[in-house]
């Protein structure tokens, strides 16, 4: 339990109807009470004036309080709803800090909630995801994590491994005994079961990355091919300048759409051609940079022009490309040859293009069978470690190795699973994780 009392604004800074200030720690009630004129009643919202120590009114506010341990952080807590004016907020913060509170670090409320056993580490990560989710699908995955679904799965698997481990310890205590074949078999089947479940979770890593980071789709092609027109059509608004002058777009333009619940960053780029223009050359260099981090490339070929010499775009080998023949509303000057005919004027081919994007980006892969848990990179690293250790344990059993070897592999696997929920942790990991939070959460 922390000895100091922290305070922070939990709503975004700026002008708003209301702002919410949170206080947590042993002095939360006393501090708020001192400025409010009376001690706030737990779990009651009370309206009144908040004053500085000279008695000057800071604002009329609503105070809500919670008593430890029945609060978000597990400590005494107070929430102050005041008017959403940053001057008022600053004055309240200054005044309470002068009385002994300390400004909270990013994520410190959630960190305290974790340290006080109100949630496991994966649930804290679920809160970050919940705050940042941009689609219903991302929200559902975030909620699964925040509700503790991954934590509960880990508990079952750890319980299973612990059973094997405690059984193994008996053999270690009596070194003369060999592991009998039927006992070996029961170990094997338990470990295999856990390994299967871990691999099931690992299969959701791609969806997890997709929902958290989104995907990059680069629109490339020769000048005038219709790239900016396509960007505008996909965005359903006029974002980029479109003109018949080749070389209109000279910088990369990045905008987001949501497709199947996934944030797709569409990157319109400078047309690729040999050029002496310094600015255009810089633009083309940026196009190449965008291509280097693309998850999918929409390569546009102008169908209203005869075939011209192919441009040298270097698309990383494993990145899928959809080649479109543009301006198909005009009389074609070249064969489609497997290219997808599109027109931003008539709308032909746009729906097909979106479907092809969904297919090639595998946006429809969901982890519904896992109750929508979509693991993060941190979970993935630890689960891979656990998977490998379980594989080693199975090998050791298969080779009749001494029980010490099996037990050491199992312990490592348990450790990795424990790190997911924060059972095993250190300050470094916590610092890294909670710094991704906003102040006031
Ligand atoms: N008829 C027809 N014209 C199109 C279509 N798409 C784009 N255009 C026209 O083609 C010209 C070039 O379009 P842009 O979208 O600016 O092409 P761009 O590839 O972004 O060109 P740069 O930025 O110069 O590389 C404009 O005059 C557009 O109006 C289409 O589907 N049909
Ligand atoms: Mg353009």
Image (cartoon, rainbow, N blue to C red):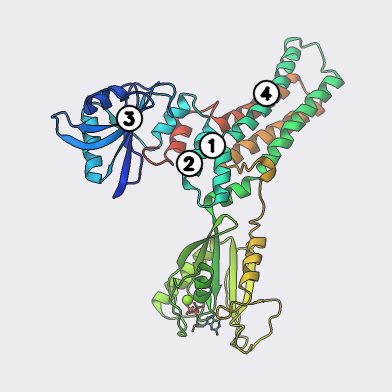
Above or below, 441 against 268 in this view is above
Q: How far apart are marks 2 and 4 (CA)?
A: 28 Å
Pick the front one: 327 or 139: 139
Dot 3: element? strand
Q: Residue at x 31, y 44 (%)?
A: 18
Density class for disc 2 (Cα within 10 Å; few <14, some 14-19, many ≥20) is many
Disc 2 + disc 4, Cβ < 8 Å: no
Q: Which of marks 2 and 4 is nearer the N terminus?
A: 2
Q: Say whether marks 1 and 3 touch (CB < 8 Å).
A: no
Residue highlighted by disc 3: 6
Q: In which quarter of the image is the C terminus?
A: top left
**202 w.r.t. 318: above or below:** above
Residue under circle 2? 128
Residue 69: percent from left, percent from top: 43, 21
Q: Which of marks 2 and 1 is nearer the N terminus?
A: 2
Observer-side mark, 4 or 3, equals 3
| Label 3 neighbour load within 10 Å: few <14, some 14-19, many 20+ | many
Q: Residue 146 carries which label?
A: 1
The mark nearer the N terminus, 4 or 1, is 1
Q: Does the residue labelled 2 lie within 8 Å of ligand 2?
A: no
List x then y, in percent, for residue 348.
Answer: 62, 77
Mark in the foreground, 2 or 4: 2
Please name the residue that numbered disc 4 is placed on. 159
Give the percent coordinates (x, y) of residue 7: 31, 32
When asked about the image quadrant of residue 248, the answer is bottom left
């Amino acid at each position: 339990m922390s000895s100091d009392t922290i305070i922070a604004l939990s709503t975004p800074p700026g002008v708003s109807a209301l702002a919410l200030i949170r206080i947590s720690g042993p002095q939360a009630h006393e501090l708020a009470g001192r400025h409010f004129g009376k001690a706030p009643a737990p779990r009651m919202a009370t309206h009144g004036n908040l004053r500085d120590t000279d008695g000057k009114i800071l604002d009329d506010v609503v105070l809500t309080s919670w008593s430890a341990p029945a609060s978000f952080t597990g400590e005494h807590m107070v929430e102050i709803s005041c008017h959403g004016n940053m001057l008022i907020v600053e004055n309240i913060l200054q005044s309470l800090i002068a009385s002994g509170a300390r400004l909270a670090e990013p994520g410190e409320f959630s960190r305290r909630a974790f340290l006080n056993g109100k949630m496991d580490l994966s649930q804290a990560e679920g809160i970050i995801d919940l705050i940042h989710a941009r689609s219903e699908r991302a929200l559902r995955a975030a909620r699964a994590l925040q509700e503790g679904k991954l934590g509960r799965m880990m508990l079952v698997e750890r319980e299973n491994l612990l059973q094997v481990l405690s059984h193994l310890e008996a053999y270690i205590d009596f070194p003369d005994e060999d592991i009998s074949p039927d006992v070996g078999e029961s170990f094997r089947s338990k470990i295999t079961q856990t390994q299967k479940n871990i691999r099931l979770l690992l299969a959701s890593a791609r969806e997890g990355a997709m929902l958290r980071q989104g995907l990059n789709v680069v629109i490339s092609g020769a000048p005038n091919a219709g790239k900016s027109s396509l960007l505008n059509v996909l965005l359903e608004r006029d974002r980029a300048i479109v003109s018949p002058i080749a070389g209109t777009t000279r910088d990369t333009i990045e905008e987001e759409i949501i497709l199947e619940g996934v944030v797709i960053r569409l990157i319109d780029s400078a047309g690729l051609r040999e050029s002496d223009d310094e600015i255009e050359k810089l633009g083309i260099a940026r196009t190449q940079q965008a291509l280097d981090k693309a998850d999918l490339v929409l390569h546009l070929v102008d169908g209203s022009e005869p075939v011209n010499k192919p441009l040298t775009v270097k698309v990383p080998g494993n990145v899928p490309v959809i080649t479109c023949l543009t301006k198909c509303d005009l009389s074609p000057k070249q064969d489609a040859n497997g290219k997808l005919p599109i027109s931003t004027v008539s709308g032909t081919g746009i729906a097909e293009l979106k479907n092809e994007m969904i297919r090639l980006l595998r946006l429809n892969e969901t982890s519904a069978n896992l109750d929508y848990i979509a693991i993060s990179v941190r979970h993935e690293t630890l689960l891979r470690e656990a998977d490998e250790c379980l594989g080693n344990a199975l090998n050791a059993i298969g080779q009749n190795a001494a029980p010490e070897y099996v037990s050491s592999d199992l312990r490592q696997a348990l450790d990795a699973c424990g790190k997911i929920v924060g059972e095993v942790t250190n300050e470094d990991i916590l610092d890294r994780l909670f710094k991704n939070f906003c102040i006031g959460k």
